[in-house]
Amino acid sequence: MALTPEDLKSLRRQRFVSRAVAVPLSLFVAAAARLRFRYGLADIDRIRGEIWKKLDAHDGPVIWAANHLTLIDSFLVYWAIFPMSRVLEDRLIPWSTPEYTNYYKLGGPVKARFIRALLYCCRCIPFLRGGEDAAAEAWRQKAYDKCVWLLREGASVFVYPEAGRSRSGWLEARRPKDFLGKMAIDVPNAKFLCVYLRADDQIATTVRPPEGSVFRVKCDLIDGARPGETNARDVSQRLFDRLAELQNEWWEDCPLPKNCAGNDVVDLKSPLLSENFSEDLSDADPDWLERHLSAKELASLREKTGAEFFRTFWRFFAAKEACHKALARTELVVPNGAFRELEVDLFRRKAVHVSTGLLLEFRFTDDDEDKLHCVAVLRGGFLGDDETPGDAVWEVSEVPPGASPGAYARERALDFIASCNDEIGSSAKLALSEDGGLPTVLWRGKPQDWSLSLSHSGRFVACSFMVS
Amino acid sequence: MAFMRKQAVVEATDINTISPEEAEKRITAGVKKYATNEANFAKADANTPYLGHIIGMGIESSNLADITMSIERQFLTKLTTKVPVSDGSAEYKLVAGELGKLRILDGQDALAATPGLSVKMLMDLGHMAKNDAYLDKVVSFAYIMACGDGWKTADALKKMAAKAEKLTGGERADAISNLKTLSAQAKEYDALLSDATKLAAAKQKTYQNDKTACDALTNELNVVLDKIKGQGGADAAAAAKLRTEEAEIRTRLKMSAAKLRVSQEVAEAAGKRRPIEDAKVAEVRKALQEAVAQAEKIA
């Protein structure tokens, strides 16, 4: 779809207006961040110095690509990267593509008009992510064409590669979106400005970061499409890989653990498990079910018949327990017995922590007549699937007669970790400590960010940890 | 429908006709079949945690709801009439009515980690008369959790010391290095337990995290309300979608607020130490110090 002369005229007018107000607007953004929200930027002079050396050496268009956790990320990234001394460098002030439904119809007429005017001056091109109808498609295409036109004019455009706020708080490099690769191929002289910005206490997706947050920033300028490159996925993958590297660098300096995973094993033949079920295991005490499952989960369970009803309930349970352990690593405490704080979708293999909205992924590694074993990952790496091995590894084993399940689970976990790493070799070199009630592996006297998780049920013990 | 659990039906008792001590005894007896650590169960008292193997009864998380339901099955109460929490609300609370089955509503059992705390929960909810003499013997939830972490640390250190003692060569050097770290962690935890103010400050951090999460949700709700206002009813489908979103956030807020109440109570209780908590802290500190001494001897 080609842009009409009216579209181009409108874009030129918006560029003119935004150029005229760039200085007061930049001052407004910086003042609001510093004074209203008491935000800070760590080590920002050094970071700006390094990135501007690279930006100054590139005279072509720039595609800004950043991680996305809050509704005001575009302002924060702009504030972090752009010092006031550079505000007149019009070419590098990015155009943004905010989601229309999030920003353009907010509040009453006065507030809505103010926000629209602000977004207009901030070079925003509204984007419509939802909708599969022709009108929505046409809207998206036009917004894309405007971005490409601006880039070809030598301007800069800010796009979130994940196409939305990350519900897990983790940028997953193995799931790249193609549109940025396509954009780079359409504008071959463009480079990607990769930015990873986050405050240490930003665990989940929110409207804005908590007041007083201090942001740490990692950024780099990398090639867009390289000569001869025609596959959008390849270009996007390179961008996502670099963003993932920046994400790892960011986590290296973070006091919180990067890896957050958990596991749970259920011995399906344990007599106490069937206590609340009917004799043929096709139904259960409704009171007891309601203490564990949300209305949505219950409806899904009620679709199961026969013994599958029993197995499905325990699948829900194992997934919740595994997710509970993964969440505990983030310092988010799900109280014991608060099973309904987690809502599990067994079909999509995703669970939501209801009060924060954090999204976890899980998979059943063992699902047979005897047992269920579930591994859940919130952040730190890829869970893996049937085709691609992930960053979480696990082991399920039987407890020898007479052994204490808790002690055996710990012993097996250390043996298993040692067997996964040639450098360790022997489990004697490892130890388990307790950090806030969570097991943590010590190696060479240092706690390791491996997110070890232990579980035991009846005849089985299990462990999982992350190798990313 | 015949549920297997019904094979062991117990005669329910009016909870106001028995003493707190008797209620505690019955609550403990009611969870016997779920306790996997029989030795700890045999000597269990008001302050023995249901969960955990070191000092706890070893009940597994898959039986957590059974603890609460076992209490419900054993007692009758007069708080049986359901009334909405507020006009038009789907949530309800229980007020005085006919003697009937005791109900513990969602989230009300969040702090009932021991038989004594279960009795306290029944008193707090109004099912039983408050008995200060009994409550003086019940360790607060904050200290059950804090002492539990101390026991785990001491146990890990003792096991590591025993393991390191048997090793030789390179393996021993690595093990000693781990032992030193564990020992330092145990000392640090001992120091934390020794000072109620420090412990309260640590628990305050959890409360602040929960408060931040609650505030973030309020912001989220305000944005949705702004979107509804901005819609102005022009698009019925979009408005309905936003209303659903609003209801979801309100549910999330309710859960978040309930959790905030728990962490607030823990933060407050961590700063208040009564003789019963002093005694429990002294026990766990002794275990930590013994483990440290043993580790230092080897290291």
Image: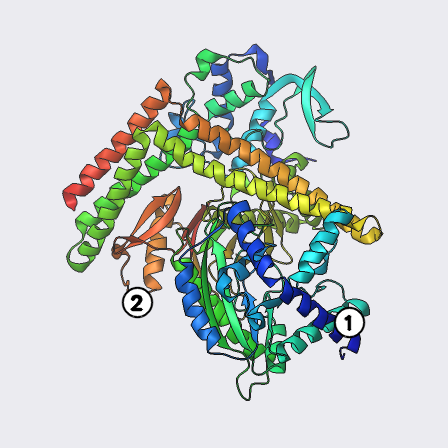
Query: Which labelled disc corresponds to residue A64?
Result: none
Q: Is residue A54 left or right of residue B11?
A: left
Q: Is residue B233 visible?
A: yes
Q: Is residue A427 left or right of residue B84?
A: left
Alpha carbon distance from label 1 to label 2: 55 Å
Identify the chain of the residue marked 2, using the numbered disc in the image.
Answer: A
Identify the chain of the residue marked 1, using the numbered disc in the image.
Answer: A
Up the image or down, A111 lies above or below A150; here it is above
Which class describes the residues within 10 Å of circle 1: few (<14), some (14-19), or many (20+)?
some
Could you tell which of marks 1 and 2 lies nearer the N-terminus? 1
Q: Is residue A382 visible?
A: no
| Secondary structure beneath label 2 | loop
Question: What's the residue at 49%, 44% (across, down)?
Answer: A332
Quarter of the rendering occupied by the N terminus of chain B: top right
Badge 2 is on which residue? A422
Up the image or down, A447 lies above or below B216; here it is below
Badge 1 is on which residue? A138
Which class describes the residues within 10 Å of circle 2: few (<14), some (14-19), or many (20+)?
few
Q: Report x, y in % for residue A374.
A: 52, 54
Count of marks overlaid on the render: 2
Query: Looking at the picture, which amino acid does disc 2 mark?
Result: Asp
| Secondary structure beneath label 1 | helix
Q: Report x, y in % for residue A430.
A: 28, 54
Q: Is residue A435 left or right of residue A341?
A: left
